Image (cartoon, rainbow, N blue to C red):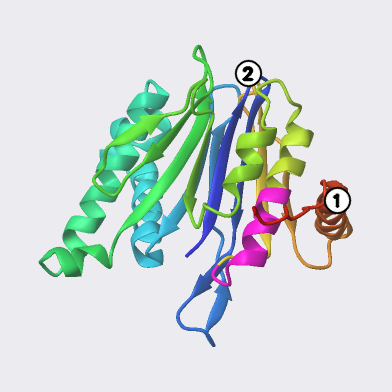
């Protein structure tokens, strides 16, 4: 399992993912689940992945291979005329990979599932954010659903719903997402450090800040410790429960 978030803001986008992959409780490794592509001044793309690792890595490898092959250049990831067409291409490629890796039957196909969050901007259009499903279809973020989560999302969702503001700076969004990830890591062993983060500023058409947080990172440790202390303080400040006397 994993946890990934793509957040759409007025000033740009922030993407974050963990790096843990499990093949059993005693076989844990680190794998990057955040990929970026850019043509400076023309386009920037970021892709987050969750699900079967072989499926998602095969999909990404196929997309990258077709960027390099002359015979696929017109239909490559970096040649699409819009973010919609880019999301469509990623969905079709994911569906293709699942189709040829499936042994047959619903039980077999479920083992090869994967999903993606795709965000970015192409010159002449606005930044856009999509969630892409194993079936190849997708939905787009907007004012009513400004962020997408894939993987183990339930523990980190409440803080996003309560705190997100569309006009918050990218740096503030990173802080918000780190709290969301810290809550998830403390609740689920299948999500873990290091955490990768990628920022993108609207109309820059180039990758913004990129950073990895691990357990030694002083900023991550400060966020984790401060959030725990703040929760305890908030709990202690709540009114005490006073049982009512039993009715006569």
Q: Nearer the viewer, residue 201 or 150?
A: 150
The residue range painted magenta reads 179-190
Q: Is residue 136 left or right of residue 150?
A: left
Q: In the image, residue 152 lies at what x, y percent?
A: 50, 58
The tag on residue 203 is 2
Q: Is residue 141 left or right of residue 11?
A: left
Please name the residue shown 34% across and 52% down the image: 62
Main SS type for the magenta part? helix
Q: Callout 1 environment at 10 Å: few (<14), some (14 to 19), or many (20+)?
A: few
Evaluate whether residue 214 shows in this view. yes
Q: Nearer the viewer, residue 211 or 106?
A: 106
- Mark 1 vs 2, N-terminal side: 2
Number of numbered discs visible in the structure rendering: 2
Let me know if residue 152 is in the magenta part.
no
How far is mark 1 from mark 2, CA to CA? 36 Å
Please name the residue shown 67% across and 57% down the image: 246
Q: In the image, residue 48 lies at what x, y percent?
A: 50, 48
Q: Nearer the viewer, mark 1 or mark 2?
A: 1
Q: Is residue 92 above or below residue 50?
A: above
Q: In the image, residue 93 lies at what x, y percent?
A: 28, 46
Q: Nearer the viewer, residue 168 or 64?
A: 168
Secondary structure under tag 2 reads loop
Q: In which quadrant of the rendered image does the C terminus lie? A: bottom right
Q: In the image, residue 148 lies at what x, y percent?
A: 50, 39
Q: In the image as oriented, which residue stretches furthest toward the front? A: 248
Q: Is residue 209 left or right of residue 230?
A: left
Please name the residue shown 29% across and 49% down the image: 134
Let me know if residue 187 is in the magenta part.
yes
The tag on residue 135 is none
The residue at which mark 1 appears reads as 230
Q: Is residue 222 above or below residue 27?
A: above
Tell me where residue 97 sits by quadrant.
Answer: bottom left
């Amino acid at each position: 399992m994993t946890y990934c978030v793509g957040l759409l803001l007025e000033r740009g986008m922030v993407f974050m993912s963990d790096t843990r992959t499990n093949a059993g409780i005693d076989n844990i490794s680190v794998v990057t689940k955040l990929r970026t592509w850019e043509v400076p001044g023309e386009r920037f793309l970021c892709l987050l992945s969750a699900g079967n690792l072989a499926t998602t890595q095969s999909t990404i490898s196929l997309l990258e291979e077709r960027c390099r092959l002359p015979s696929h250049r017109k239909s490559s990831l970096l040649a699409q005329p819009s973010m919609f067409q880019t999301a469509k291409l990623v969905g079709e490629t994911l569906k293709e990979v699942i189709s040829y890796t499936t042994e047959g039957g619903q039980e077999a196909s479920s083992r090869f599932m994967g999903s993606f969050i795709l965000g970015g901007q192409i010159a002449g259009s606005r930044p856009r954010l999509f969630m892409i499903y194993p079936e190849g279809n997708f939905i787009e973020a907007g004012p009513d659903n400004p962020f997408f989560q894939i993987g183990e999302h339930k523990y980190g969702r409440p803080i996003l719903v309560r705190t997100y503001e569309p006009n918050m700076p990218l740096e503030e969004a990173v802080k918000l997402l780190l709290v969301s990830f810290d809550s998830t890591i403390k609740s689920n062993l299948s999500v873990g450090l290091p955490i990768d983060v990628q920022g993108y500023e609207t109309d820059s058409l180039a990758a913004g800040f990129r950073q990895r947080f691990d357990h030694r990172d002083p900023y991550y440790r400060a966020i984790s410790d401060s959030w725990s202390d703040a929760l305890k303080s908030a709990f202690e400040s709540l009114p005490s429960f006073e049982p009512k006397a039993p009715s006569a």
